[in-house]
Image (cartoon, rainbow, N blue to C red):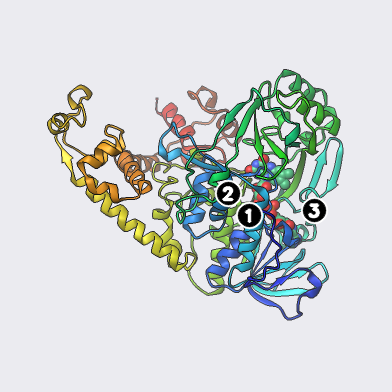
Amino acid sequence: RRQAPITLATRRSLVHTTATAIPKDLRYDVVVIGGGHAGCEAAAAAARTGARTALVTQKLETIGEMSCNPSFGGVGKGILLREVDALGGVAPTICDRAGIHFRVLNRSKGPAVWGPRAQIDRSIYRSEMQQHMASQPNLDLIAAAVEDITVNGDHQVTGVALGNGQIIGTRAVVVTTGTFLRGVINIGAYFTPAGRKGEGPSVGLAQTLETFGFKLGRLRTGTPPRIKKSTVCFDGLLEQPSDYPATPFSYLNERVALEDSFIQCHLTHTNSAAHQLVHDTLHENNHVRQDALGPRYCPSIESKANRHQVWLEPEGLDSDVIYPNGISMTMPEEAQLRFVRSIAGLENAQITQLGYGVSYDFVDPRQLHRTLETKMIHSLFLAGQINGTTGYEEAASQGIIAGINAALKVRGEPSFTVDRTQAYIGVLIDDLVTKGVLEPYRMFTSRAEYRLSLRSDNADTRLTALGHACGAVDEPRFQHFCQQQKELAELTQLLESVELTPHEWNSGGWYNSLRCGLLKPCSVASMMAFGFVSDSTAADLVPALRSFNPRLVERVKIEAMYAHMMNRQRASAESYRRQASLEIPPGFAFEKVHSLPLEALERLREHAPRTIGDAAQIQGITPDALARLVRALQS
Ligand code: FAD
């Protein structure tokens, strides 16, 4: 469980632990700058896709660092992670090794919006990621800060310059510097230049991007204070156990590694006294008064009102640190302690690290192609928080696309993109490059028009063959995928082929079709999908079912459940395209649109779109908001 040293005896990578040790004539196909979640996926993907790659990052020991919450996945984000896995990505398998509490969120809703999520042991994750990167063939790790990127007269990348002036030659660069570009952290009235607590900002690179002519903006985010676990009183707090057995993130895994050591999370709440304290200290809290916008859907406690949920999440199996999820804050030190101690269970809590905010430069992502290559500089790719997103999963998703494309470009092969109908990754990148961002962008299921088909259960069916065709998915994973697809096809055929009339369902005693109004013959697959017959009843009817993996049985049920709706969704997508030309009269009263979400209302007023097609391009306008607007215009 302890963090492994990066210089592993078994490593296949060359590891340079200081910039001074780097040979003069070092050259790579692809250089990835930054060892966060975007950088790890980008570097591993470029290496898998056949490019000789270097990951250059400030400190090797922070490769795979989780800057904020010790968790991965969730609603929307969990599907992104499964897509990263389907493309051969690294983070999902590592989550399966480091996860200490797994839940599928939204279980009470349809499978299309299920969100696999896991609480992660921070130190195991970091150590497993570092081991993976150190043993990735075709990938070298270099500890250094990149200060500049060199280009030739054709605006083609030629190298990266380190702080000591040394240049590493390369044919493509992927920049994944997260919150580090001119980063400034803030507690109360105090500001310190830093990309993250204890780590210096990246200033030279921000200047380089500016010099190239990129439009930069400023965003901010924050993190809660950490609490000493032994000072928390958990009595009386609601316990939240893990799912057991856990659903792994990776399609390669049947089980997760630490299932026997799962921990509990606990729920507590803020109260009016705590919120009064926030209000009283606003004048000493510079972060919340800045112009830079923060994450609307991961807000700091300063922007929340009254009673609010706080999940107490252990940071690891052997860790004495609790991450209080929901109280990200930048108040002065003494106010943070008073705030924390006003919460039930935390009356005697000690803070191990203060909450803080960070503001940083990002690059307007409308300056990127869908491959995440910049339009201005050839073979320069950007991925992760630098493009205005927030979250590990959003970063990893962009990293894998940028890494694959950097390698393909160097090899002179066609680029690799996915669109909105194929993947949440397609939705994410399409939103970024067409709409840009006004505030840190995070993924939600509501952003995806085709969410009935973009599910967490079928990301491999949607993406693995595509990833294999471009070289990003290795042969063992592809063979595993092909075998599963074969079994899924056999299983579907088996369950669809047994079809009984209402009378037969009834007379066999399997299902009371008369009482439940079943009028037509119905297959075992459909009856299972809608929960009309249990898996064991179905197995009595189709004994061969018992020889199949229960996870595959679940996938067939979900497909059968959505088959009808997906046909409708295709038709609705077609009509949606026709509606794009519908005109919105000047001065239209958007506030009169029934149940329009507040965010959509603000955006529509601000942009005053002339057609539904224009409205669809605005950041924050979801398909649901658009449908409400269309109904209002047509009524
Ligand atoms: P990072 O994970 O930040 O990695 C950047 C990497 O680049 C680092 O390894 C760094 O050392 C390296 N680097 C930077 N500059 C250079 C250089 N010049 N040369 C070499 N290496 C360089 N996300 C949420 O979803 N919700 C939250 O509430 C939230 N709160 C956050 C609070 C804080 C204080 C911070 C710092 C982050 C927060 N995040 C939050 C964001 C989350 O951490 C990021 O979305 C995610 O880590 C982005 O991944 P990334 O790979 O783009 O960048």
Q: Which residue is mark 3?
A: 199
Q: CA distance from mark 3 to mark 2?
A: 22 Å
Q: Is mark 3 within 8 Å of ligand 1?
A: yes
Q: Does 442 sit left or right of 153 as displayed? A: left
Q: CA distance from mark 1 to mark 3?
A: 16 Å
- The residue type indicated by label 1 comes to His
Q: Earlier in the sequence, mark 3 or mark 2?
A: 3
Q: Is mark 1 within 8 Å of ligand 1?
A: yes
Quadrant position of residue 329: top right
Element marked by disc 1: helix
- The residue type indicated by label 2 comes to Glu
Q: Determine the residue positioned at 54% across, 72% down.
A: 50
Residue 183 appears anywhere in the view: yes
In the rendering, which numbered label is found on residue 393?
2
Q: Determine the residue positioned at 80% across, 31% down.
A: 336
Q: CB of mark 3 within 8 Å of CB of mark 2?
A: no
Q: Residue furthest bottom?
A: 25
Residue 363 appears anywhere in the view: no
Where residue 419 appears, x then y in whole percent? 46, 53
Q: Earlier in the sequence, mark 1 or mark 3?
A: 1
Q: Determine the residue positioned at 43% across, 45% down.
A: 455
Q: Indicate whether 532 appears above or below 205.
A: above
Q: Residue furthest top?
A: 272
Q: CB of mark 1 within 8 Å of CB of mark 2?
A: yes
In-front residue for pair 457/483: 483
Q: CB of mark 1 within 8 Å of CB of mark 3?
A: no
